[in-house]
Image (cartoon, helix red, strand yellow):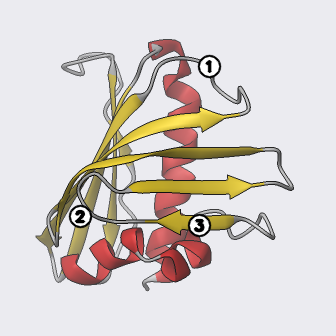
């Protein structure tokens, strides 16, 4: 399945405070959703290049998550706002250790059957639009690793 990573923060995008990145994945929506909510799965594709990263995930509405890369000196945590398998996740997003300062952000992840696999759409609601380029690169890299993991 061809890689389709698309950023819609280009000129003309509807909302500059929302970064949207898409990726086609060669697995069904239920399988892809599980890869986002199972700590053992996350460890294989989220930050695999950072040994010793911990993945604590309580994937239910109101449940907390924390992904911590002590070796790199940062992590991210938040709470699941919605868990609707196999279609959707919504969570709050807070960087640890001042990696990116600011209020909690909101991330939506949508999973839709597409061309024999799944189209994953990440919508990151930015507290600081100037951080969009960094997030675009991070989400793009992350989604490519997800696609490779599920290929």
Q: Which residue is mark 1?
A: 101
Q: Quadrant of the C terminus?
A: bottom left
Q: Pinpoint residue 59: horizontal percent, then vertical percent.
A: 33, 65
**Is residue 28 something that shows in the picture?**
no
Q: Secondary structure at mark 2?
A: strand
Number of numbered callouts drawn: 3
Residue displayed at 39% across by 53% down: 5
Crowd tier of the residue under label 1, counting other residues whose Cα lies within 10 Å: few below 14, some 14–19, many 20 or above = few
Helix, strand or loop at label 1? It is loop
Picture disc at residue 55: 3
- Tag 3 secondary structure: strand
Q: Residues within 10 Å of mark 3 (few under 14, many from 20)?
A: many
Q: Residue at x 49, y 47 (%)?
A: 139
Quadrant where the N terminus is found in the figure: bottom left
Select label 1 or label 2 by which is in front: 1
Asked if disc 2 and disc 3 are in contact, CB closer than 8 Å, the reply is no
Q: Disc 1 or 3, which lies upstream in sequence?
A: 3
Q: Quadrant of residue 21?
A: top left
Q: Give the mark nearest the N terminus, 1 or 2.
A: 1
Q: Is residue 29 left or right of residue 92?
A: left
Disc nearer the start of the sequence (2/3): 3
Q: State the image coordinates of residue 84 (x, y, percent, origin top left).
A: 14, 63
Local packing at callout 2 (Cα closer than 10 Å; few below 14, some 14-19, many 20+) is many
In the picture of the structure, the residue carrying the numbered disc 2 is 119
């Amino acid at each position: 399945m061809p890689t389709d990573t698309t950023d819609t923060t280009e000129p003309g995008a509807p909302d500059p405070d929302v970064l949207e990145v898409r990726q086609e994945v060669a697995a069904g929506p239920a399988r892809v959703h599980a890869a986002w909510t199972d700590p053992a799965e996350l460890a294989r594709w989220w930050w695999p290049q950072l040994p010793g990263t911990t993945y604590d995930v309580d994937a239910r509405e109101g449940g907390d998550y924390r992904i911590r890369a002590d070796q790199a000196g940062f992590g991210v945590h938040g709470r699941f706002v919605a868990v609707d398998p196999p279609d959707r996740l919504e969570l709050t997003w807070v960087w640890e250790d001042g990696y990116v300062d600011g209020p909690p952000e909101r991330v939506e992840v949508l999973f839709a059957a597409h061309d024999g696999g799944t189209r994953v759409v990440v919508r990151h609601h930015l507290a600081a639009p100037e951080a969009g380029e960094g997030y675009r690169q991070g989400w793009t890299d992350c989604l490519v690793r997800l696609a490779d993991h599920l290929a």
